[in-house]
Amino acid sequence: MRIVNASVPLPENTGYAQAKEAKAVREIISDVRKNGDSAVRKYAQKFDKAGIQPFEVSRKEIKDAYRQVDRQTVSALRKAAGNIRAFAKMQLGGMKGFSMKSKGILLGQKIVPLKRVGCYVPGGRYPLPSTALMCVIPAKVAGVREVIVCSPRIKPATIVAADIAGADRVLKVGGVQAIAAMAYGTKTIPKVDKIVGPGNRFVTIAKKEVYGEVGIDFLAGPSEVLIIADRTGDAGMIAADLLAQAEHDPEAKANLITNSRELARKVNAEIARQVERLSTRKTAEAALKNGRIIIAKSLGEAAELSNAMAPEHLELQVKRPGKLAGRLTNYGSLFIGKWSAEVFGDYCSGTNHTLPTGRAARYRGGLSPMDFVKALTWQRITRKGVREMAKTATRLAEAEGLDAHMKAAQRRAG
C-alpha cells in the first residue's frame, strides 16, 4: 500500500450516478413497472441465467436447504441471530412513545412499525447469508408485519439464514428487477413500504431511482475500513483486517492512519506476506490499490482526519483506545482495541453490518430497528390551550401573510 502524509486531500466520492448505468437501470425499472412478472423473469434469465418458476422459495425448498447446509453453519447462524436480535431489542428500547401536558395542551408521540419491507441480500461474488440476518432481524424486532427477502442465485445458506431471521417470504429474484418489483409490485411480488440492504452499483442506482415511491435505508457503495494505530499496534492483525476488507470487492477501500512510520513498514510487509496465502488474492490485491497508509503527526490529527473521512468501519489499535474513541464522531461502526476485529461485527457480535459508506456516516448510523418504525406525533388541545396559543399562532400567521391560517386560530379563540 502507498505510504503518504496526512496532508493529502481526501478522496472524492465516486458515487454510482454514471449516466450510462442510470439510463439502463431506468429502462429496466420502467419495463418491470409496465410488464410485471414477465419483465422480472426476462431480466433474471438475462443477468442471472435463472429460469425461475416460480419466484418464491417454497417450504419444501426451505426444509431442503437445512439438509444441504452443515450443522455447524446452521448453529453459527442461530448463534449470530441471537446476538443480533438481543442488540436490536436494546436499540428499539431507546425509542419510546410519550406524552406531555402543559396548560390545556396535550402532545405525544407513538411508535408505529412499517407494514411491509423488502430486504435485498446480494448473491453475486459471494453469497451473504449474514446480510439476511442483519436486514431481517431488526425489521421483525421493530414489529414489521411482513418481511420479504429478494436474492439472486440464492444459496441454501442464505435461505436458512432468512428463515432463522424470521423472513415471511423468500424470493429467488435479484438485481434491478428485484428492486423495481418490490417498489411497484407485480402479480407475485408485493409492493413494499421500504427497501433495505446492500447491492452492486446497479442495485444502488435502482434504489435511488425508486426512492420516493418507497423508502430506502441509504445508498451503499464499496465497503470501507479505516484503522487508526500507533506504535503499539499489532502489524499482523492490522494487515489481516485490511485484507479482510479488501477481499470483498476490487473497489473496496482499506486505509490505515498511523503516527509510526515503523509500524507502516511492518504492516506493508505483513500484507505482502499474508496476501500470498489468500484464495481471494486477486480481488484483495486489486482493492489494496485503492487504499493508503497515511502518516499523521499525532493521534489528534488522525482523529480529525478520520472524522472527515467518516468511514464505514473504524478500528482502533492504540495504547489508550477508549480515550481516542471519545474524539471520534463519524463512523458506521467502531471497533475499540486490537481484539475487536471488524469480522466479528460483520458476522456475530450483535451490531449491524449494514452500514453507511461514502462518508454518509457524517449524517446517519447503521441499519437498526429505528429504520423500520415511524415516530408519529399527535396533539389534543382544550379551550384553555387555545387561549394559551391563539395569540402566538395569530401573530405568526399574520407575519407570514397567511390570512386563512390567522382566521382559523381566531375562530377558536372566540
Image (spheres, helix red, strand yellow):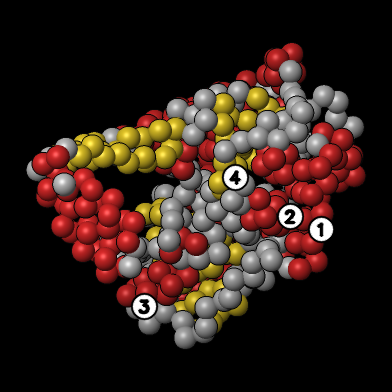
Give the mark nearest the N terminus, 2 or 3.
2
Secondary structure of the residue carrying tag 3 is helix
Give the residue type that dot 2 points to: Phe
The N terminus: image quadrant:
bottom right
Which residue appears at 32% of the width and 35% of the height? 110
Which residue appears at 55% of the width and 53% of the height? 218
In this view, 211 is above or below 311: above
Give the mark nearest the N terminus, 4 or 1.
1
Give the mark nearest the N terminus, 2 or 4.
2
Residue 214 is marked as 4
Residue 44 visible to the viewer: no
Query: Are circles 2 and 1 on residues that touch, CB within 8 Å?
Result: yes
Q: Position of residue 8 (x, y in %)?
A: 51, 84
**Mark 4 against mark 3, which lies toward the viewer?**
4
Give the mark nearest the N terminus, 3 or 1.
1
**Mark 2 against mark 1, which lies toward the viewer?**
1
